[in-house]
């Protein structure tokens, strides 16, 4: 299953996208095309920001960059862990394989991946299909640290061109 986390306009399109927005958006698009061509289930997670956030429900920043097809569920969440207070667990096959991509590496991608691992799922994080913003250090360093942590926790880290469905 392909799990796309917070692939929303506020982070992947101007005016304030993540630094790697163009390459990450392209990678996510390629991953999505590959999953759909293989008949792999796709589940979307969308963050519902608060009143002052760029992803407040109904705003342009809240919209998904890629359009879900009919039958592809969209899960709305309000916290970094996509499993918290959602029905995401009901959409995953028990102890199945989950391919993860999306935003932001150190928040929603990390928390959701760690929960999936704790629930017994095999997790593959797509290294060129997740990103974040610069903070106390460059975004690329933050994303790499998340990859190391998830790998140490049992996740597989792979590039888009290494993913097969």
Image (cartoon, helix red, strand yellow):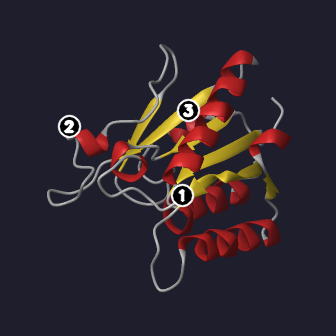
Q: State the residue position of label 3.
A: 43
Q: Who's the residue at 39% across and 36% down the image?
A: 64
Label 2 Cα neighbours within 10 Å, binned few <14 / some 14-19 / many ≥20: few
109 in relation to 106, above or below: above
Residue 13 position in % (x across, y down):
38, 46
Q: State the residue position of label 2.
A: 58
- Give the Cα separation between the discs numbered 2 and 3: 20 Å
Q: State the residue position of label 1.
A: 20
User: Relative to the observer, which residue lies in front, 122 or 103?
Assistant: 103
The residue mark sitting in front, 2 or 1, is: 1
Label 1 Cα neighbours within 10 Å, binned few <14 / some 14-19 / many ≥20: some
- Give the Cα separation between the discs numbered 1 and 3: 23 Å
Q: Who's the residue at 49% across and 52% down the image?
A: 21
Q: Is residue 60 left or right of residue 118?
A: left
> Element type at marker 2?
loop
Mark sitting earlier along the chain (2/3): 3
How many marks can you see? 3
| Displayed quadrant of residue 17 | bottom left
Residue 119 position in % (x across, y down):
69, 53
């Amino acid at each position: 299953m392909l799990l796309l986390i917070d692939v929303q306009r506020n982070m992947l399109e101007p005016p304030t996208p993540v630094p790697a927005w163009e390459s990450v958006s392209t990678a996510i698009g390629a991953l999505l095309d590959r999953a759909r061509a293989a008949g792999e289930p796709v589940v979307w997670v969308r963050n519902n920001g608060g009143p002052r956030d760029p992803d407040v429900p109904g705003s342009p920043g809240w919209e998904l960059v890629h359009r879900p097809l009919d039958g592809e569920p969209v899960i709305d969440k309000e916290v970094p862990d996509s499993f918290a207070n959602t029905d995401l667990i009901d959409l995953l096959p028990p102890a199945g394989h989950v391919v993860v991509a999306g935003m932001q590496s150190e928040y929603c991608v990390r928390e959701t991946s760690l929960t999936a691992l704790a629930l017994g799922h095999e997790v593959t994080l797509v290294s060129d299909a997740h990103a974040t913003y610069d903070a106390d250090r460059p975004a690329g360093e933050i994303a790499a640290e998340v990859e190391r942590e998830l790998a140490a926790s049992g996740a597989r880290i792979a590039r888009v061109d290494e993913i097969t469905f």
